[in-house]
Each structure stands twice: as C-alpha cells, then as structure tokens.
C-alpha cells in the first residue's frame, strides 16, 4: 500500500491514509476530460463513492488499481471513460419523465406490434418497457401526464429560486433530482399525480382499449331522486395504472438495508403515493340538471377529477410542510424530529436538505438565480432581495404587448386591441 502510494505520487495521485489526495497530473487530466462532459472532479468522486462503492480513495486510484499497475493521468482518464458507461444511469438519472418531451409520443406511432418503439423510449426501466409493450396506447397519456406535472411544477415554483427548470437530456430536471430534497419530493408527487389525471380522463374519453367510464359506487349521501351515471373520470383505473407504471422503476431495485439508496427508494415511493392520493382526495361529484326550462327536476351525477391546478396547490402546501425523515435500524423511514406529528401517506417526505439554489453548481444541478426576473416591491420569495440572494439586481426597460380596449359584440364575442407599453423589469445580478 505504501509502496504503491509512493509510485502513485509520480503518476498523479498520492496515498493519504484511508483516502487519497489528487495530484496535479491526475487532477489536470480529470478536469480536462470531465469539462467536456459537463462534470467536475468533485462530482466524479462523490458519484463513484456513492454508486460504485469504491471506497474513500481518489478517483484515479480505484479506477486504475484493478489494472494491476499504476497508470499515468492520461491512461487513468481513459479508464474513467469506461466507467462512464457503468455510471450513465447515475450521472444522467434517466427518467420516464422524458416521455413528456419525446417526439415519438404521437398516437399514430403506437400501432399493433410496435414493440421496438418501447425499447427505444429513453428513460424507461425494464419493467416500464414491458408495460409499454402491453399497454402501448397508454404511453401517449403517460407522456401527457408527465408534461402536465412538469408545467404545474413550473407554475407553483415560478417565484422560487428553484423554479422547476428542465434540462436538455433524459433526466429532464438534471442532477438536482439526485438529492433527496423537498423539491425532489414535490416533483415525484406532481408527476405521479399527472399520470393519474391523464389516464383517468383518457379512459372516460374512450381513448384506451382496457378501460372506459368510471364504475365508482354511488355516494351514500347522494339524494335518492338523483341519478348516478353519466361518464365519469375513471379514477380507480388511473390510480392503479399510475401506481403500476410509475413505481415500477423503484420496485425493480434492491439495495442494502440501511443504505442511502434504500432510503431514497422509500422516499420516492412514498411521494409517488402522496401525489396519487391527492388526486383521489380532490375528486368530487359533478351533476347536470334535466328538466323543462332548466327546472332541474332531475339530476344526473358522476365522479369528476378536480382541476389539476387544485392538485398543484394542495401538493405545494404539502411541500411547505414536508417532513424530514431518516432510516431507523430496521431500514424504515422515520421522522427525524419526533416532536412533530408523524407524516401520513398523504404527506410529502424528504431525507436531505435542499442545496443552495442561489448560484449555479454543476455538482448539485442548481442553475442559480443569475438573470432571473424579480419583483422590486415584493418582500416574498419573488422579491429582488430574496430571489437575488443579496447580490443586487439590474433595471431594464422592456416593451410588452398586451390586450386592451376590449369590447363585447353581439353575439357573442369580445374584441380587443393590442397595445404596446414600456415597463421596468428587474433582473438578478
């Protein structure tokens, strides 16, 4: 060990007890290579420690040690490129969320026997690909559900430092989702809810071969003279299919008891369920009147999902009151602070503190708030003081076009003019 450490000093790394300090050669080579990949040396170290279980040594040593000799930094960097293939899932964190942006998601693409299409969809686990092959007509609506969830996430966080921004790869949200934070909890919940919403409504509209209108039981408190029927959103089917598909990736995994990965798996499953239950909790009975001249002598009622904005609002409240969790000795998630009420299956949970979203950080996935618009007069999170993290802001004049001088015309439409005005805008430094 000591001899190898001495040799390694000339090759770019040196032994330092149980760990290792990157030498200039190793670090320079790593930085040059990883810069092309959009990574950092620190991220490589953390990813390999956490995912490859290679101990506490520096990146170069565990990567090159199995080769039986001490390699220089160039060969070490080359060896690391081989590790990229093994670590692709960890670094990119592929997700079924990418269905929201996949160009293949058009109805005409899902023809009988189109199994190759399922294998080509980026981000699906093996279990999800099998479900794709069995329920090919569902995939469009899974994509729509993911897109609905992403849009709602961006609306709910539009005035926050982290604003649910997407990135241009199959991870959709980038490395920020690798942290078990409140934001990750909300994202998992809202996307699972989006699938329930989209599939339930697709059933009602007759778009799916394996389901139709809701068969929910008649509510006990519905007046006897009201009819229970119509064609309601099939919440039961949407809930069950969302659980089967969205949870498939987590259910396929197996991690050592007590590991970080096992805690994260439990967190993801819990928040997926919280999202689905929020959709279920907000579903309501909707009725239509029948009778001469709108007398409403008879009503027909059915089960209807709430507007998705209400789902987003409810989950945002759960985000604000999310519970910090940790693993106990039995491998179960328990509340970190026992003085608070234990979270229910309807609440959001997280296992890590949120990263600093003020500045761009490749290792955490934070995009920072530089260039974000802020409200000069607000004292809330959208205010310039908080949004800009005390860095100050620049003021610009901007030209905007809006509707104006609107008039109602018989019958029945509103006609407006388009007016241009100059406004002040404030942008974080």
Image (cartoon, grey):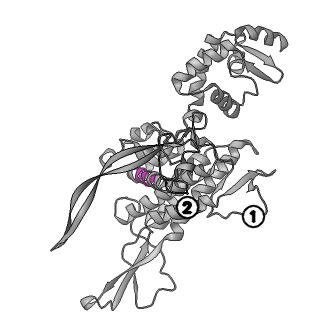
**Residue 181: x and y, percent?**
63, 48
Quadrant assignment, res 297: bottom left
Q: Is residue 206 left or right of residue 88?
A: left
Q: Is residue 240 left or right of residue 268?
A: left
Let me know if residue 193 appears in the view: yes
The mark nearer the N terminus, 1 or 2, is 2
Seen from the viewer's position, the closer of residues 222 and 16 is: 16
Report the quarter where the N terminus lies: top right
- The residue under label 2 is 315
- The residue under label 1 is 340
- The mark total stands at 2
- Please report the bounds of the magenta region as a residue range: 143-148
For label 1, the SS is loop
**Residue 340: x and y, percent?**
75, 64
Q: Is residue 243 left or right of residue 107?
A: right
- Membership of 146 in magenta stretch: yes
- Residue 305 numbered tag: none
The reply to whether discs 1 and 2 touch (Cβ–Cβ < 8 Å) is no
The crowd level at tag 2 (other Cα within 10 Å; few <14, some 14-19, many 20+) is many
Q: Separation of disc 1 and disc 2 at Cα? A: 19 Å
- Membership of 109 in magenta stretch: no
**Residue 273: x and y, percent?**
59, 59
Q: Is residue 404 above or below residue 228?
A: above
Residue located 56% across and 41% down the image = 391
Quadrant assignment, res 75: top right
């Amino acid at each position: 060990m000591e001899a190898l450490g001495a040799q390694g000093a000339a090759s770019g790394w040196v032994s330092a007890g149980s760990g290792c300090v990157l030498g200039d050669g190793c670090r320079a080579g790593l930085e040059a290579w990883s810069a092309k990949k959009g990574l950092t040396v620190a991220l490589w170290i953390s990813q390999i420690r956490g995912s490859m279980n290679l101990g506490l040594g520096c990146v170069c040593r565990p990567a090159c040690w199995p080769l039986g000799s001490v390699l220089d930094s160039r060969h070490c960097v080359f060896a690391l490129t081989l590790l990229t293939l093994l670590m692709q899932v960890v670094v990119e964190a592929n997700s079924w969320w990418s269905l929201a942006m996949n160009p293949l998601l058009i109805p005409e693409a899902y023809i009988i026997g189109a199994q190759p299409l399922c294998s080509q969809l980026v981000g699906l686990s093996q279990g999800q690909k099998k479900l794709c092959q069995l329920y090919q007509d569902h995939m469009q609506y899974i994509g729509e559900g993911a897109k609905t969830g992403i849009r709602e996430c961006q609306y709910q966080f539009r005035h926050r430092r982290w604003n649910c921004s997407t990135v241009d790869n199959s991870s959709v949200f980038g490395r920020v989702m690798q942290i078990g934070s409140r934001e990750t909890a909300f994202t998992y919940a809202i996307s699972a809810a989006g699938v329930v919403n989209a599939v339930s409504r697709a059933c009602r509209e007759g778009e799916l071969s394996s389901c139709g209108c809701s068969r929910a039981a008649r509510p006990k408190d519905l007046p006897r003279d009201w009819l229970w029927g119509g064609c309601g959103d099939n919440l039961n089917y949407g809930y069950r299919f969302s659980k089967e598909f969205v949870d498939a990736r987590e259910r396929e995994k197996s991690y050592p008891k007590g590991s970080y990965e096992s805690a994260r798996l439990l967190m993801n499953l819990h928040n997926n369920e919280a999202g689905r239950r929020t959709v279920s909790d907000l579903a309501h009975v909707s009725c239509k009147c029948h009778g001469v001249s709108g007398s409403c002598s008879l009503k027909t009622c059915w089960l209807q999902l709430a507007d998705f904005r209400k789902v987003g609002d409810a989950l945002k409240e759960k985000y604000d009151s999310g519970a910090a969790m940790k693993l106990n000795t039995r491998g179960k998630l328990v509340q970190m602070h026992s003085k608070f009420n234990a979270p229910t299956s309807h609440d959001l949970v997280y296992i890590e503190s949120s990263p600093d979203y003020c500045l761009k950080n490749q290792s955490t996935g934070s995009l920072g708030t530089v260039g974000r618009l802020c409200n000069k007069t607000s004292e809330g999170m959208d205010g310039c003081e908080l949004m800009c993290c005390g860095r100050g802001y620049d003021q610009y004049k901007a030209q905007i076009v809006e509707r104006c001088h609107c008039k109602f015309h018989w019958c029945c439409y509103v006609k407006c003019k388009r007016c241009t005005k100059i406004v002040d805008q404030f942008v974080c430094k």
